[in-house]
Amino acid sequence: MAGPQIDPSLYRDRDVVPVRRALVSVSDKTGLLELAQALAAADVEIVSTGGSAALLRENGIAVKDVSEITGFPESLGGRVKTLHPSVHAGLLADLRLEDHETQLGELGILPFELVVVNLYPFVETVASGAEGDAVVEQIDIGGPAMVRASAKNFANVAIAVSPESYPAIIDALGQGGTTLAQRRELAARAFAHTAAYDRAVATWFAEETLEGEGDLPQHLTIKAERLATLRYGENSHQRAAIYTRVGGHGIAQATQLQGKEMSYNNYVDADAALRAAFDLIKPAVAIIKHANPCGIAIGAPQALDPIASAHLRAHECDPVSAFGGVIAANRTVTLKMAENLRDIFTEVIVAPDFEPEALEVFKLKKNLRVLQLPADWRQEPMDVRLVSGGLLLQDADRFPNEIESLVDSWQLVSGERPADDQLENLSFAWKSCRAVKSNAIVLAKNSATVGIGMGQVNRVDSCRLAVERAGDRAAGSVAASDAFFPFADGPQVLLDAGITTIIQPGGSVRDQEVIDAAQAAGVTMYFTGERHFFH
């Protein structure tokens, strides 16, 4: 039986392909009506599916359902509708080839010259916090198949995957059709679109595996797009850029509300500040310099403005180092906190939100970079670090939220259990220690750091540095060490300074020597059984 007749002169050896038939199936319906109206005005037959077809009919645009073409109804809740030879033969037929033309005629199939398809909102669904089947149902199958088929056949078919391409398509209708150069460019965009989509799906599955109890994935796909080129890297002779990861929800997704352009070092320090401030549950502020804290604190008990109080207490730890620092707050920045910062040179401040009055104060500091975290900000479940030739992957170092969960897991090896307020101070010191580069020693009073020793090649020097920075404030404070003391010399530096309580992982072959030193000084010591190196 003879099929539809195709005029080969429309295709063979011609750069411009006129649009006679279009397939439309979109999730993002931005600009769809304008495009469809232009197609209808150009007497283009529109074949469509589901919601797209319904929208066009509601607006008086003639549409033919895909099921009329395939002779097969949509099934399985819409999972199967376009996966049919009557659709894909019309997408893949290369009408420069006589046998393709002949086969379409024999099969009774008409070709498509334009395909308008964008995919299910998978990335948006993941970003909304949806989980499980709700996410799986947004994995598009038929859409990518149509996009890839059309892009492969760019010699004959124009594929539009974004509303940004619609104006050029509308213009092409008035010029007699799409050009080969246009179709090739559209094909390149289409393949990039499906590649990014597949990477997003693969990343979600990988992260689901990572957050579970199974083995780490055999293959890891990380998709990132360049957000901005930075002036330079850590040093002026190094090139640099910041990239955003698909599905990311961290410092790279923060919105800059004011200030100079962010630098490479600004981003590194801001991320370190988040690590320090957001480990703490109560209103807290961390001040960072060169990726190390120079002050961490929670708001004073009964403070009228807890976050402003937290900032002042963090600043008091080391005002000299805080000059030119980067600040993170785990609560909305208030007017009072902004006023406290008025005369303190600060490079960056990052927080979940800012009072409008605080932003007005910050406008007086034009160079201050103000970053607002995305609404879905949360700490990443995994840490990734590049090494030469590959990368390292590990579970993120986390703490339980409740102080009781921490204390119940500790082992009291010297002295007596402190009062609850001192235990809270000890928990604060232990959590703060995780944010300090190893070897790390943190001295704290009333849930505010008073001395920090960081990044030394031996623990004794870290103890000395922390005590030196604390000065008279060392007496009566508690001390946290990110890893065990290999000898009693480090703790002795702390004991001589008047430390009342020490918390450390334990696990050294000389633990008993360290315990004996604490007992001889009448000092309480806890072993946590868990270290928190940070390199």
Image (spheres, rainbow, N blue to C red):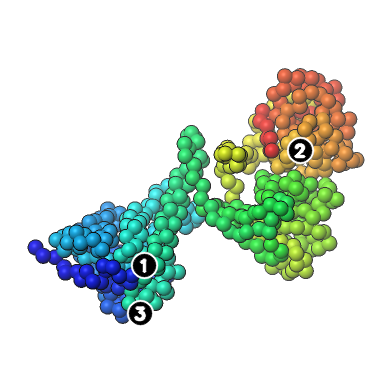
Q: Amino acid under label 2?
A: Gly
Where is residue 6? Give x, y as percent: 19, 69
- Do residues under tags 3 and 1 come within 8 Å of each other at their CB atoms? no
Q: Residue furthest right?
A: 472
Residue at 66 percent of width and 65 percent of height: 257
Label 2 environment density (alpha carbons within 10 Å; few <14, some 14–19, many ≥20): some
Q: Which disc number belongs to residue 36?
A: none
Question: Which residue, given by chain and number where applicable, does mark 2 sit on?
Answer: 455
Label 3 environment density (alpha carbons within 10 Å; few <14, some 14–19, many ≥20): few
* Residue 451 in the figure: left or right of residue 90: right
Where is residue 284? Give x, y as percent: 72, 50
* Residue 468 in the figure: left or right of residue 501: right
* Front position among marks 3 and 1: 1
* Front position among marks 1 and 2: 1
Q: Which disc number belongs to residue 180?
A: 1
Q: What quarter of the picture does the N terminus occupy?
A: bottom left
**Label 2 secondary element:** loop
Where is residue 283? Give x, y as percent: 70, 51
Cα distance, mark 3 to mark 1?
16 Å
**Label 1 secondary element:** helix
Q: Which disc number belongs to residue 174?
A: 3
Cα distance, mark 2 to mark 3?
67 Å
